[in-house]
Image (cartoon, helix red, strand yellow):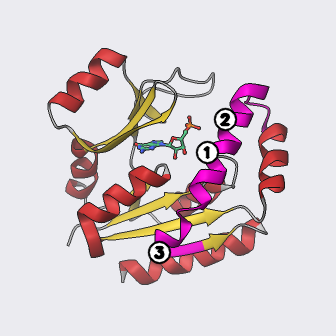
Amino acid sequence: MNKIIIITAPSGAGKTTIVKKLLAEMPQLAFSISATTRIARDTEVDGQDYYFLTQEDFHQKIDNNAFAEYEMVYAHKYYGTLKTELQRIWDNNQVPMVDIDVKGALSIKEKYHDAALAIFIAPPTLDTLRVRLSERGTETQASLEERLGKARYELSFSHEFDEIVVNDELERAYVEVKALVQAFLK
Ligand code: 5GP
C-alpha cells in the first residue's frame, strides 16, 4: 500500500522544524514539494521548497486534474499537491511527507483513508503563536494578523485529524510525532 504522512499546523506552531528533523532521521520519508503561486522568499529554491508557478500555470493544472488537492490558502495565493509529485516519491520507494494546510490535509485524508496518517501539530496557546510568528520576522503586521486568524480557524478542525500533538516543548513534541510515524509505517 502506498502510504502518505500528512503534517498540518497553524503557521508558526513549529511544524517546519519537526518536519525537517523527521526527514533527516527517517530516510524512507521524502518531502512532498507543493506547487504554489506565492512569491519565493529569499532563501527558497524553486523545485526544492516549492514549485513556484504563475497563476496561469496553476489554473492550467487545476483544469488538467493534476492536483491530489489544492487550496487558496491565503488571499489569491494557491497551494497544491501534484499527483505527479506523490507518484515520483512512491516510485522511489519512499513515503511522501505532505506539509499542508488543514483543508488540504483533510481532503487528502478523505481520498486516501487508511493509507494516510494525518497529524495536527497544535501550539500550546494562540499567544505563543503570536510571539513565535513575530520573532520569526518573516511577516508584516497585516500578514501576521492574517496568519493568526487562520490559525484560530484551523484549530477548530484539529479534532478531525488522526492525531493531535501539542508543541509545548519542541523536542518532546518531536519524539511523539516520530513515534506515531514509525508505528504507522510498520
Ligand atoms: P508558506 O507560505 O508559509 O510556505 O505556507 C503557507 C501555508 O500553506 C502553510 O500552512 C502550508 O502548510 C500550506 N501549504 C503548503 N503547501 C500546500 C499544499 O500543497 N496544499 C495545501 N492545501 N496547503 C499547502
Which residue has dot 1 on it?
150
Q: Is residue 178 above or below residue 32?
A: below
- Residues under labels 1 and 2: Cα distance? 6 Å
Say which of 155 and 135 sits in front. Answer: 155
Kindly indicate the quadrant of the structure image that contains residue 147.
Answer: top right
> Label 3 crowding class (10 Å Cα cut-off): few <14, some 14-19, many 20+?
some
Q: Are marks 3 and 2 in contact (CB under 8 Å)?
A: no
Question: Three-letter amino acid code at disc 1?
Answer: Lys
**Mark 1 secondary-structure assignment:** helix
- Residue at the image point whose x is 62% and y is 27% from the top: 43
| Label disc, if present, on residue 117 of the rendered structure | none
Disc 1, disc 2: CB below 8 Å? yes
Q: Position of residue 131 (x, y in %)?
A: 85, 47
In this rendering, position of residue 99 left or right of residue 44 = left
The quarter of the picture where the C terminus appears is bottom left
Q: Residues within 10 Å of mark 1 (few under 14, many from 20)?
A: some
* Residue 131, above or below 1: above
Question: Which image quadrant is residue 52 in?
Answer: top left
Residue 30 in view in this figure: no
Image point 79% across, 32% down: which residue? Answer: 137
Q: Examine the rendered structure and indicate whether residue 130 appears above or below residue 19.
A: above
Horizontal and vertical percent position of residue 72: 43, 34
Which disc, if any, is residue 181?
Answer: 3
- In this picture, which residue range is highlighted in magenta? 136-164
Which mark sits nearer the N-terminus, 3 or 2? 2
Identified by mark 2, the residue type is: Glu
Mark 2, residue position: 146
Which tag, 3 or 1, sits closer to the chain's start? 1
Q: Is residue 67 left or right of residue 25?
A: left
Quarter of the picture holding the N terminus = bottom left
Closer to the observer: label 3 or label 1? 1
Circle 3: residue type: Val
